[in-house]
Image: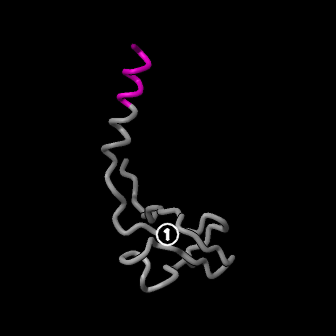
Amino acid sequence: MEKLKRLKSLLIGVAWQSPISNPIKICPRCGSKNIKIASKLDGWLTPERYVCNDCGYIGQIVLEVEEERDEEKGG
């Protein structure tokens, strides 16, 4: 029973994460930000495929990260 409670709390935490606004897409192979959609048809007519201009990766999987902000810490 305790395991179910922990699982439920974990799922609630994951489900309520806010989406990243304007995510940066990164190549899963080399970590480059120099990645773009392969074709103008991708995303509306066919599934999105990405191409990395640095390592040549072609695929549907990319990493999306939030841009780091320089925030001053109070105190």
Residues rendered magenta in the picture: 1-9
Q: Nearer the viewer, residue 49 or 71?
A: 49
* Residue 75, magenta (yes or no): no
User: Which SS type dominates the magenta stretch?
Assistant: helix
Q: Position of residue 64 (x, y in %)?
A: 47, 63
Q: Residue at x 54, y 64 (%)?
A: 61
Q: How many marks?
A: 1
Q: Residue at x 31, y 52 (%)?
A: 18
* Residue 5, magenta (yes or no): yes
Quarter location, residue 21:
bottom left
Kindly identify which residue carries mark 1. Answer: 25
Q: Position of residue 51 (x, y in %)?
A: 58, 78
Q: Residue at x 52, y 62 (%)?
A: 63
Quarter location, residue 23:
bottom left
Where 7 falls versus 63 (above or below)? Answer: above
Where 18 falls versus 64 (above or below)? Answer: above
Q: In the picture, which quadrant includes the N terminus?
A: top left
> How many residues crowd around disc 1 within 10 Å: few (fewer than 14), some, or many (20 or more)?
some
Where 43 falls versus 6 (above or below)? Answer: below
Q: Residue furthest top?
A: 1
Q: Nearer the viewer, residue 23 or 73?
A: 23
Where 28 falls versus 75 (above or below)? Answer: below
Q: Position of residue 47 (x, y in %)?
A: 44, 71
Q: Residue furthest front?
A: 45
Q: Nearer the viewer, residue 28 or 41?
A: 41
Q: Residue at x 46, y 72 (%)?
A: 48
The kind of secondary structure element at disc 1 is strand
Tell me the kind of residue under disc 1: Lys
